[in-house]
Amino acid sequence: MENQPLDQTDSRKDQKHLISRNLEIRHLRRHWFHDDTEQKSSSEHDLSHKKARHKGTYVGCFINNETEHALGGTILYDFRKMTSALCQDTCSESGFRYAGLEYGAECHCGNRVCSRRARGEDCNLYCRGEKGSRCGGVGRMSVYRVEDRLPGQRRYRTVHYHGCYKKPQNSTADFLIQTPGPTHTPQQCIETCTDKDLPLAFLRGQDCFCSHVPFLFTIQMNEQEYMCERSNQTNHSSPYDLDYYWVYSTPVLDATCKERTFLPQKSSTLVALSSFPGAGNTWLRHLIELATGFYTGSYYFDGSLYNKGFKGEKDYWQSGRVICVKTHESGQREIEMFNSAILLMRNPYRSLMAEFNRKCAGHLGYASDVHWRSKEWSEFVDSYSSWWVSHALAWLRFAHRLLVVHFENLQKDLTSQLKTITAFLNTSIPEERLLCTESNRDGHFKRSGSRSLTFDPFNPEMRARIDEYIRTVDKALRDRNLDGLPQEYMPR
């Protein structure tokens, strides 16, 4: 959608005031944005290290590169000070049998070791948070066997239920590996397929099958649940009922979307991935990288995000090697440096709380009740709520070519939203990669669960101000002949 001029007849004065207000608080914003989060997170990790229990047995040093992957399960980057004990505990608690450490900071989990042994001296890097303990090397992984959990006791964070699917008519059953045992629950089937290092689990009645072929079950083939329920009956009325399966993704990463690279040729077009802090920019970057296979970049540098696998984080933002560039800037000059932009928006109440959590407790933590009741929170809302509206108005006004995406719509309808985003990026997604992206939609940086406050952190004065900002942005969107904000944003 090309830019259309905003009708500012009635709101020019208000918007100038908001932009002016934005400039006044820029110094305060930078204080918030570059605060002592690193120090707080480090102290929290130090405490977690003390609680970690060393329960594993060292197996050896193994090759881990682009052609040989030692462990095929979850990969965890979100530890600033990695230790072997912390990695082992993490893998054990996720239901895996092996933990592997690489580059002194990366933790890998899996249920079988799939690569060749390397020389013991090749694992020559010490763990970042544990001097004297080896944590792999370059392309080499130190592997430990961790404590086993009994069947049915494992808990997987990255399991995803796809729905009820019909087996394609032009396929054979060869791609399905039937597992032994008279009966299976979904939990048992997922465990069995995870043990086999296969990314997909299929349940037909109480029969469990595993596979590594995702493209035979495409997104469009999703059926009504009752078709799978019919196949769950003891006496099948027809062989037709045997063609329906409940489909789950296991924690084993599908190689289809595991590998990511920089663009093969430098692009002369710069695409911004712009958002207000706390709107889900990191999550959308994760989705774009999985779906396209290309790294995203950043106008800034965040070492913790680099450690989580966002390798484009260290690349110069104007290099042309990344598919889009994260930015929170909202000045005219910074906006016009980009040829086009994806503007990610989120309900300001949710964005403010998410960013305050990050500010107080890091990317994965939660602010305490003391923080929410402090003067710090009221100053934060005063500063950041006006930034939320001025950020949106500026990108709507100055962006050369713009796609507006709402965080809430991504949550509700990920597949169609990703297709729209990748089309805007002039990239097509194979069906199997889209399925793989949906399977791994959360990544490994999402806050676990949700911490519900026992009180409303927004007082009436805050709500009145934020509600007025919501109305202002909604009008600006409609003035550009775009859809307004989702109904759930609107004041009631």
Image: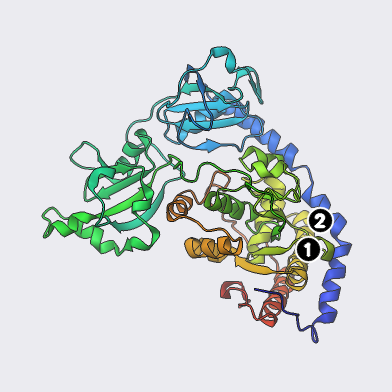
Identify the amino acid type marked 1.
Ile
Secondary element at tag 1: helix
- Up/down of 126 relative to 327, above or below: above
User: Which residue lies under the disc numbered 2?
Assistant: 29
> Along the line of sight, which residue is nearer the eye, 211 or 281?
211
Q: Please name the residue shown 73% across and 72% down the image.
A: 396
- Up/down of 187 relative to 137, above or below: below
Which quarter of the image is occupied by the N terminus? bottom right
Asked if marks 2 and 1 touch (Cβ < 8 Å), the reply is no
> Along the line of sight, which residue is nearer the eye, 150 or 141?
141
User: Which residue lies under the disc numbered 1?
Assistant: 335
Tell whether 451 sits left or right of 5. Answer: left
> Along the line of sight, which residue is nearer the eye, 44 or 106?
106
Secondary element at tag 2: helix
Q: Picture coordinates of residue 48 (x, y %)?
A: 60, 31
Tell whether 203 sits left or right of 118. Answer: left
Tell whether 284 sits left or right of 146. Answer: right
> Along the line of sight, which residue is nearer the eye, 425 or 467?
425
Crowding at mark 1 (Cα within 10 Å: few <14, some 14-19, many 20+): many
Q: Picture coordinates of residue 103 (x, y %)?
A: 62, 27
**Sequence-earlier tag: 2 or 1:** 2
Residue 135's quadrant in the figure?
top right
Q: Picture coordinates of residue 483 (x, y %)?
A: 61, 77
Q: Please name the residue shown 60% across and 22% down the image.
A: 137
Identify the amino acid type marked 2.
Arg
